[in-house]
Amino acid sequence: MRLGWSDEGNLPANTTTRQAYDLLAEGFGPGFNGPLVVTAVPGPGDTGVAVQALQRTLARTRGVAAVTPPFPDDAAGPEAYVMNLIPTTAPQDEATTDLVTALRDDVIPAAVAGTGLDVDVTGSAAANIDVTHYLVGRMLFLFGAVLAVAFVLLMIVFRSLLVPIKAVVMNVASSAAAYGIVVAVFQWGWGGRLLGIEGGPINPYVPLMLFAIVFGLSMDYEVFMLSRIREEYSRTGDAASAVADGLASTARVITAAAAIMVVVFASFMFEELRELKLFGIGLAVAVLLDATLVRMVVVPATMELLGDRNWWIPGWLDRLLPRLDVERHTASRPRPAIDQPEPSHEPVPS
């Protein structure tokens, strides 16, 4: 999955924003839609020679179409300069990301060595690149934290090791399937003409939001089914019949709830914004696969094969974990007896 911020070139062709984007790209080059801003703060006693040398170095850099002359904040006593740098590639292209990285890590440090200049590269394209790197660097931590908390809670509720492991694996599989569909359609462009979109990068917040929503919905279906199966197993002690009875009693409810969510999410595809279509397709496919293939086939099949091992947990771990009864089972109380009328002692008439 290529993460990045898609630009206005992915908007529908009939929108004025897309038309303006295309006109600017045709007249001034694709990089004109996402210029970089280079700021330079000179050191003490600098007369501006170093800034002029920096501007010439930037203009000769590969991937740079043009660099404006340094503009001072005060012509009489400048304390800062700003330059606009136009890349040769569009804001969403990987080459633009490579250019920003090269400017920050190689070109600018070599150009200002020994001059005392303090130079930074910013602008909307550079800011989007920074946000992408920030979110990507923390994505695995978010996924790991959510999965770990879900595993511990399921282990406490169902007093099992295999059940929470299976639930976490199945939920990850549902999210991975949704990511695959999203990449095929919105990054590779499969079926893009039918949806009115073009292939491009996936905005970095999309995997996070998809994972959070899909994980919540799939875990809801998982807990609903497992609670019923666990209840039947506690009552009968037969693992096979518990899976069959639990699936039979929850399948219709899960299918109906999932069908509603699929219709709601699929309706997003009728919107013009690329991000809404992306969310709609990703969520609809994830819920559909989770409620049909994963929840109705894979989960019951694995539990049927595992049998009584589904509910095994080491004794030391069982004693260590707190007791949590989410359904608040209470002991049944005896039904009160109906008051009987007292016998009459009056003589019965003959």
Image (spheres, rainbow, N blue to C red):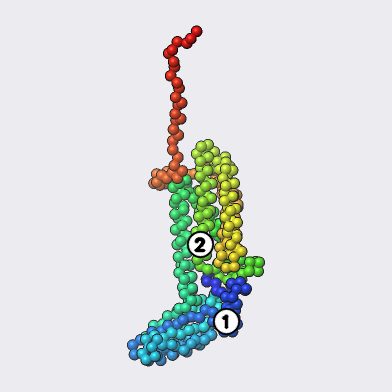
| Amino acid marked by disc 2 | Met
Q: How many marks?
A: 2
Q: Quadrant of residue 279?
A: bottom right
Residue at numbered disc 1: 24
Residue 60 at x, y = what percent?
Answer: 50, 87
Work out whether residue 40 can be spotted. Answer: yes
Picture residue at 52% right of the left edge, 54% below the top: 217
Q: Secondary structure at mark 1?
A: helix
Give how far across and how far down residue 18 sits, in percent: 59, 75
Asked which quadrant contains residue 182, the reply is bottom right
| Picture quarter with the N terminus | bottom right
Residue 295, visible in the rendered structure: no
Residue at the farthest left position: 44
Q: Residue at x 43, y 87 (%)?
A: 71
Q: Earlier in the sequence, mark 2 or mark 1?
A: 1
Residue at point 50%, 81% (across, down): 35
Closer to the camera, 114 or 217?
Answer: 217
Q: Between label 2 and label 1, give the one nearer the viewer.
A: 1
User: Cβ–Cβ below 8 Å for labels 2 and 1?
Assistant: no
What is the spatial separation of the Cα atoms under label 2 and label 1, in whole angstroms? 33 Å
* Label 2 neighbour load within 10 Å: few <14, some 14-19, many 20+: few
Decide: few, some or many residues near mark 1? Use Cα within 10 Å; few <14, some 14-19, many ≥20.
Answer: some
User: Closer to the camera, 188 or 279?
Assistant: 279
Amino acid beneath label 1: Leu
Quadrant assignment, res 325:
top left
SS of the residue under disc 2: helix
x and y percentages locating residue 171 in the rendered image? 53, 55
Residue furthest to the top in view is 350
Q: Above or below — where is 313 with respect to 180? A: above
Image disc number at residue 209: 2
Question: What percent of the width, then of the height, locates residue 75?
Answer: 39, 90
